[in-house]
Amino acid sequence: MTSLAIIGGGIAGKSLLFALAKSKKNFSHLTVFDSDSFAHTCSLRSTAVVAARGLTSGHSELGDLLIASFNTFSLHVQNDLPDGVFPITQFSAASTKLDQFKQRYPEGKSSRQFLDLSFNQDLYLAQEPAYLIDPAIYLKWLSDESRHLPLELKNDFVMSVEELPQGIEIKTNNGHVELFDSVIFAGGASNIFWREGIQDDLNKVKPVQGSYLEFKHADFGVRSFSLTLDGDNLIYHAHTKKLLLGSTTMPGQLEIAPVSSLQEIYQRLQSHLQTTLPDFATAEIKIGIREKAPKRSPYMLNQGKRWWIGGYYKNGYSLGYHWAEKLISKF
């Protein structure tokens, strides 16, 4: 029987909790340190669509991993029936670079219509099964499913972690001090704060800002969907009448909205659609900070009784679950 601390309460941390709950590992005590007010949780500021996006096996290590994680997540949805996860169709369309796009999506066809919406002209359109996630609902479900664990949730930010002979000593912003047998850092871009001992590895991981528009009280029909058109995304949550448009990508950790870039995305999407989008001024801008590791691949690092997990730059929700199962199997 051992004690474990998990630092981070986003998709990485909550997936670890759920994997622990399913694994029946015997821990005497589990503590999750999470402070969204101090370090904003990227998982709650994500467009959160899980899709294979035309990937096929055998072309790259990352591609194979993304396919495997999509399959793992699909089984999770089928077997565990999580709240906040909705099977949808992912539509992908292109008006430029068609040769390259058709290689990725050979089953597509020319079309002006998708669901109840129409384009202004025929576009090459492909579709595939996907999952739309309501982050707040799904993350709460993962926590609720872990409630039988000997679990304590602390709304606090970890200031220091030191490996002592008697265990791992954690000190927090609120003055809390506690010893644990092991610790897992699952804090997303904040993992860089706790890099002692693996600086060479985590120094290669860079923060990347992403932003998107969120429109409330939008009515685009009774079916949720996701459309990616020339790299721009239009995502509709039918259950909450919420429309997301994005996304921008910018190196760095500043949470400053690139309004002009978001306006350009809005205008490009509107130029292709017969339907009128909600007024730009009514949108709320959402900003999340992801971490981008070399080759855009996730990482799992170990030093003594300390583990680091993250780098969910691509398909974070499916990678989070897939990678959590791999890490928990090592305990």
Image (cartoon, grey):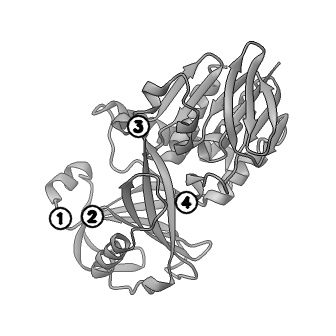
Residue type, mark 1 in image: Thr
Instruction: Look at mark 4 in the image and give the residue it sits on.
Output: 45
Question: Looking at the image, which residue sits at the far top?
Answer: 165
Please identify the quadrant where the C terminus is shown: top right
Q: In the rendered image, is residue 79 in sight?
A: yes
* Residue 134: image tag: none
Per the image, label 3 sits on a secondary structure element best described as loop
Please identify the quadrant where the N terminus is shown: top right
Instruction: Look at mark 3 in the image and give the residue it sits on.
Output: 293
* Residue 250 location (% of width, % of height): 37, 56
* Residue 48 location (% of width, % of height): 51, 56
Instruction: Look at mark 1 in the image and give the residue it sits on.
Output: 96
Per the image, label 4 sits on a secondary structure element best described as loop
Q: Quadrant of residue 126?
A: bottom left
Q: Nearer the viewer, residue 15 or 85?
A: 15
Instruction: Look at mark 2 in the image and give the residue it sits on.
Output: 230
Distance between the alpha carbons at the discs numbered 2 and 1: 7 Å
* Residue 263 location (% of width, % of height): 35, 76
